[in-house]
Amino acid sequence: MIVASSIDEISEALCETSLTIGNFDGVHMGHAKLLSRTRLKAEINNRISVALTFEPHPRRVILGKNDPPLITPTPQKLELIEALGINITVVLPFTKEIAAHTPEAFVKKFLVDGFKVKDLVIGYDYAFGRGRKGNYELLSALGAQYGYVVERLDPVILDGAVVSSTRIRDLVEAGNVWDARPLLNRFYQVRGEVVRGFGRGSKLVGFPTANLHLVDELVPKHGVYAVWVQADGQTYSGVANIGHNPTFGNAVAGVEAHIFDFKGDLYGKTIRVHFVQRIRDERKFSGVEELTARIREDAALARRILSMPEARL
Ligand code: RBF
Ligand code: MG
């Protein structure tokens, strides 16, 4: 997959395109439907499939804060889009200048002149621009004028409700990672570099943990989780804790994973933690002994959870 941040970088590769546009945060089941449909249309019509997305998340630019937290930071988003067979993804820097375009000007400049769009695939609720004026009706009217066809797809419904990034964020923030899985079609994961912690895990508690440095990513509700950990090209089972370690009173909340049957050094390496099932709240224990005993139980429970066929990665 070609990844670019402007049309100029890829203009040579561009002939007529089938294109889908959106934030695609999470690349969830609804997004997968749009991306697959776009790819199919490109195959059928002998066109190039393009996903057009923005960075930072437009809501962050408009509201001026780091909100919403991302389900999939850009590198992971690109990996997932690529897996769906899209030829080119353009991550346009979302600036106030881009936001200032009227929907008509945006369509002409980017979609028509830039991407030579012939098939445009959008989600059931897609709209852009001030007052969400750039909606299906307007995009279709412009399509009649410029010679492209718009297809609007119905939402994916799971357990009686629409699959959306907001619904997934709410589930993950509530610690309900097991229920987020079917919406994502994978476990919720974070990835980060392993950084030095306090060294208490190995020396004091007897359960060494890899402490993750996360950038700008959605963190599940504080507590203990059964997890899969991918490190050094291998997959391990493990148990993770998220929080302030109230037994010791850390100032900053962290994400740490104890990896079963692992001996080695992960400092400086990037690992992925896949959240399978929440086990309990983080607690303040009377001391190290009580904490260690509890972690031993957590570990045993995590192993049982991860040995269920339904928990396979
Ligand atoms: N720290 C706490 O203060 N309270 C907890 O409930 C708690 N639960 C944990 C559960 C697991 C499975 C693991 C691996 C760690 C947990 N910790 C908890 C964090 C522990 O205090 C930390 O790993 C060490 O202090 C090393 O930094
Ligand atoms: Mg640690």
Image (cartoon, rainbow, N blue to C red):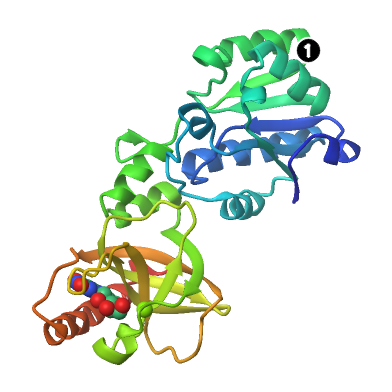
Relative to 251, say whether 108 is above or below: above
In the image: residue 152, left or right of residue 240: right
Task: Indicate the position of residue 240 as horizontal and vertical percent values.
Answer: 32, 71
In the image, 294 versus 62, the foreground residue is 62
Q: Please give left or right for residue 223 compared with residue 284 in the image.
A: right
Look at 47% across and 51% down and name the residue there. Answer: 216
| Amino acid found under the numbered disc labelled 1 | Tyr
Q: Quadrant of ligand 1?
A: bottom left
Task: Report if residue 77 is visible in the image.
Answer: yes
Q: Quadrant of residue 286?
A: bottom left
Q: Which residue is mark 1?
A: 146
State the image coordinates of residue 211 (x, y, percent, origin top left): 41, 73
Q: Say above or below: 103 vs 302.
A: above
Q: Is residue 158 left or right of residue 132?
A: left
Q: Position of residue 35 (x, y in %)?
A: 61, 40
Q: Position of residue 158 (x, y in %)?
A: 35, 40
For the point 27% across and 68% down, the residue is 250
Q: Work out whether residue 187 can be spotted.
A: no
Residue 143 falls left or right of residue 207: right
Q: Nearer the viewer, residue 164 or 250?
A: 250
In the picture as drawn, the residue positioned furthest to the front comes out as 251
Tell me: residue 306, above or below residue 167: below
Q: Name which residue lies at 49% across and 34% down.
A: 60
Q: Quadrant of the C terminus?
A: bottom left
Tell me if the residue at label 1 has its CB under 8 Å from ligand 2: no
